[in-house]
Amino acid sequence: MDFQEYLNLQRRTFVQYYRCLSTSLLNKENLDEDSNFLIMPPSALDRLTGLNIEFPMLFQIKNPSTELATHCGVLEFIADEGFIHMPSRLMAHLGIQENEVVLVRNTRLPTATFVKLRPHTTDFLGVSHHKELLEYNIRNKFQCLTAGETIAVAEGDRRFYLDLLETRPADAVCTLNTDCEVDFAPPLDYVEPPRAPAPAPVASSQGSGEPPQFTGAAARMDGKPVEQPPPAPVPAGGRHGDQPRQPAQFTGVAMRMDGKPVELPPPPTPSPAAASAGALGAPKRKIRFDAPAAGSGVSKGKEGAGAGKEQEKRFSGTQYSLKD
């Protein structure tokens, strides 16, 4: 910023060069080095009052040589003329040494709606009341937050450092009288647990043309020894591997869970028609149950009588009526 621009800004707003000192030099008990409050000279208050600056009074502090900037509130107007005091943490962030010049300018910041924080250590995860801890520290120490900085929150003698990864709706926000969403990134010293090794692939029998083989031991439910089937005969002049392996047959005895003897059904006897159809390779027919057509009768001649007897022979079940 050149001198002419500096003079033009002074007519419209508060902008001033000051030499910077740390707040620890004041030896005041109510000053917190973890906060971002400024101590300014009384002349600054007169100037701000004449410009009708609205509350809260927020300021941008910039290092003129590096253009690094941060944002602060004001706590008191008791500093010596030409000087301001600010926390040493912010001085280190701006790269400012004692008695170096900074540019102070009042500003307006949007109200915070979202803040993303990253703890430095996993000890912060052990705190059971993050909400109350953040509310208390931010309300008493920080009137504004700037993305890219590190803040410190305290609980008794414990101090937790948090990086401000993101703030919305701007890179610098006001934290007064707002409901703000807070998100947390993994701590800097967080180490992910090692992943479990993937299980070794099991050799599959697909594509080999053979069924999967059972590798266990055969056993019977009654405790008797299992009768193994005889080995398949080997063709003359060949080897066991010349013929495809047949699946093993079940050689046990059928049993019921209640101990009663098992009644085996007799083997079905195929009808001559089915046998002939199977022999010829004729396809199976679909059976369709339809209502009889109107006007269709059954002839009472010999053919009808013979057909009736044949039907009686084929139907061996009990006759029922839907009316019963």
Image (tube, grey):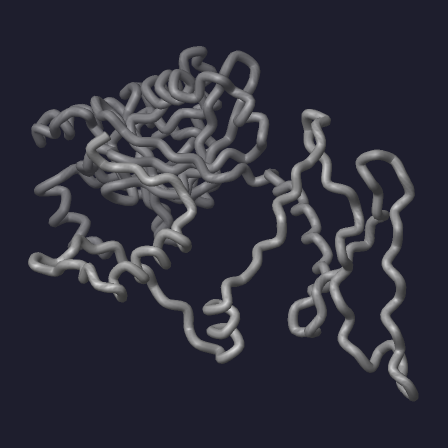
For residue 200, above or below residue 245: above
Q: Nearer the viewer, residue 3 or 261?
A: 261
In the picture, measured across the screen, residue 204 lies left or right of residue 171, that is right
Q: Is residue 151 left or right of residue 62?
A: right
In the image, residue 45 sits, relative to residue 120, either above or below, namely: above
Where the C terminus falls, by quadrant?
top left
Q: Residue at x 26, y 64 (%)?
A: 302
Q: Residue at x 82, y 40 (%)?
A: 220
Residue at image position (45%, 17%) is 129
Residue 80 seen in this snapshot: no
Image quadrant containing the N terminus: bottom left
Corner quadrant of residue 247: bottom right
- Where residue 293 appears, x then y in whole percent? 12, 58
Residue found at x 7% / y 59%: 295
Q: Residue furthest front?
A: 302
- Can residue 122 be seen? yes
Query: On the rendered structure, is 247 left or right of 102?
Result: right
Identify which residue, 115 or 156, lies in the foreground: 115
Q: Position of residue 258 (x, y in %)?
A: 68, 25
Q: Nearer the viewer, residue 136 or 233?
A: 233
